[in-house]
Amino acid sequence: MENAPFIKQLSSNNRVVREKSLEALQKVLVSEPFMKSKQAQYEKLWKALYYTMWFSDRPRPQQKMARQLGELYSLYGTVGDNKSDDITLSDRAFLKFCRAFWKVITLEWFNIDRYRMDKYLLLLRRVFFNQLKYLQTRQWNEELVEMYITKVLKHSPLSGSAKVYNGIPFHLIDILLDEWERLVSKRDDEFEVEDEITDAEEIANLVKETPLSQFIEIFTDLRKDYIVSKGIRNKIKEDLLSDERLVSWGAIPVTEETAENDEEEQEEENAEDEPEAEWKGF
């Protein structure tokens, strides 16, 4: 991977060159030497893949490219022991590849113009889905899930840092439950699936077997942190935590205590919005 021409080919403005390089990359990603590479090598790779998407034009090729780039994460499910309780070499490579994507997309987000934004939103959706899919392939290994949450999501896209443009956490808030439902129901946004699960009760039971509540906790923590921008906190409350699916899936309980907390937070927010009374002196 240290070979510069290979990186340049992935970010070539020639479609044929990009596609051949992407095909060759699949073998490199799961090779033992590359899986043992340092984090910087993964970041160089994702910087090249970022431009692979950049030069992809027209809706159909963009959809195909977003899908192909997202499915690179699934390659790690084809090597190693998916039933192992220990963190494997594939797991560590997967985590480094995850961190690389979020770091690159966070740094480059400001440079994405409005004409290219839609395809990068799609890329983010496909990548996030396939990252979750790998965790599912690993049977939601507790240690791996915890590492993914702390070393990947909380490290960058959902860190609450002002350095992360709001568009990234906003989009994650928008897609989290949809992609989680798609994951357990085996639904595909582009193709028909014969064994797709459509029964709402069955989907709810399947979701209950997943660690969705741990992911929701990331957002509840962000909502309680008043250093985080008010826009993000409001969106979490209005577009995520108010979603009825969370209750039916058992990911968030509805209690009198939570209702009281909501009222208290609303009062605090209203107080923030009220203009200070003018001081007229003694």
Image (cartoon, rainbow, N blue to C red):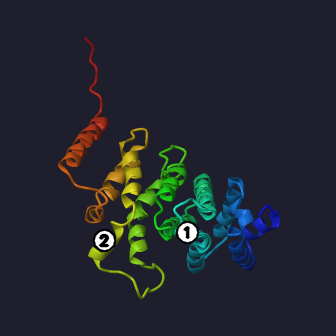
Question: Residue 166 in the image: x percent, y percent?
Answer: 48, 51
Mark 2 to mark 1: distance in Å?
A: 33 Å
Mark 2 falls on what kind of element? helix
Res. 276 image quadrant:
top left
Q: How many marks?
A: 2
The type of residue carrying mark 1 is Lys
Q: Quadrant of the N terminus?
A: bottom right
Q: Which mark is residue 267?
A: none
Q: Nearer the viewer, mark 2 or mark 1?
A: 2
Q: Is residue 175 visible?
A: yes
Q: Earlier in the sequence, mark 2 or mark 1?
A: 1
Q: Mark 1 = which residue?
A: 119
Q: Which mark is residue 205?
A: 2
Position of residue 169 relative to residue 60, above or below, is above
In the drawing, does residue 248 fall left or right of residue 135?
left
Q: Crowdedness of circle 2 by 10 Å Cα count: few (<14), some, many (20+)? A: some
Q: Residue at x 81, y 63 (%)?
A: 4
In the drawing, does residue 123 fall left or right of residue 52?
left
Q: Residue at x 26, y 39 (%)?
A: 270
Q: Is residue 111 visible?
A: no
Q: Residue at x 56, y 65 (%)?
A: 120
Q: Residue at x 59, y 58 (%)?
A: 95
Q: Nearer the viewer, residue 156 or 38?
A: 38
The type of residue carrying mark 2 is Asn
In the drawing, does residue 89 fall left or right of residue 145?
right
